Image (tube, rainbow, N blue to C red):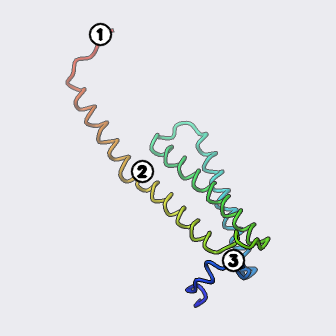
Amino acid sequence: MMNLLTLSYWFGIRPAPFIPAVERALLVAFAVWMLGGIVASLLLLKRGIAKPTRVALEKAAGLLTWSGLTGLVLWGFEYERIPILSMRFFYVLLVAWIAYGVYGIVRYLRVEVPAQQRIEEEKAAREKWLPKRKR
């Protein structure tokens, strides 16, 4: 555990290989992550999904697919022991990218969707009293 606190662990050009169980767990996790993105993309094909849900699902599908693919590429670099590209620091960047994507999705659902709903309600309340166009 103390090894995680050293700079040579995160920035070593030729890092030590993962324990086989951790290596398999990473492979399975990244594959499941990518498959989750594909399933989320397939769910978008269904009709009748509300617009906020659809947009959030699109963002989640993109995040899951691209981060899963990136994780599989990183795993491939680690598996082949490619010197610079298998640095552990890239996993930190991947986690930061995923955290930023999750933040964007949560911000959309908690800030932007209620703001859009308020605007629609105000518009409906205002137009309620306006005369309708004759056709």
Ranked by sequence position, the earlier of labels 1 and 2 is: 2
The residue beneath circle 2 is: 108
Question: At 47% from the left edge and 40% from the top edge, which residue is drawn?
Answer: 50
Q: Between marks 1 and 2, how big is the CA–CA gap?
A: 38 Å
Q: Measured from the top left, where is residue 43 in percent x and y?
A: 60, 45
Q: Amino acid at mark 1?
A: Lys
Place residue 21 in its image quadrant: bottom right
In the picture, the quarter occupied by the C terminus is top left
Q: Is residue 24 above or below residue 9?
A: above
Say which residue appears at 59% left-offset and 39% top-offset.
46
104 lies left or right of 25: left
Residue kind at label 2, given as amino acid type: Tyr
Q: Residues within 10 Å of mark 1 (few under 14, many from 20)?
A: few
Residue at 74 percent of width and 68 percent of height: 77
- Seen from the viewer's position, the closer of residues 17 and 103 is 17
SS type, badge 2: helix
The reply, left or right, for residue 110 in relation to residue 105 is: left
62 or 52, which lies in front?
A: 62
Residue 13, picture quadrant: bottom right
Residue at the limit of the structure toward the bottom, as seen here: 2
**Mark found first going from the N terminus, 1 or 3:** 3
User: Disc 3 marks which amino acid?
Assistant: Ile
| Residue at the extreme right | 80
Q: Nearer the viewer, mark 3 or mark 2?
A: 3
Disc on res. 13:
3
* N-term-proximal mark, 3 vs 2: 3
Instruction: Nearest to the eye among marks 1 and 3: give it.
Output: 3
Residue occupied by mark 1: 134
**Which picture quadrant has residue 44?**
top right
Residue 119, position as x, y percentages in the image: 29, 38
Label 1, label 3: how far apart the Cα atoms are: 74 Å
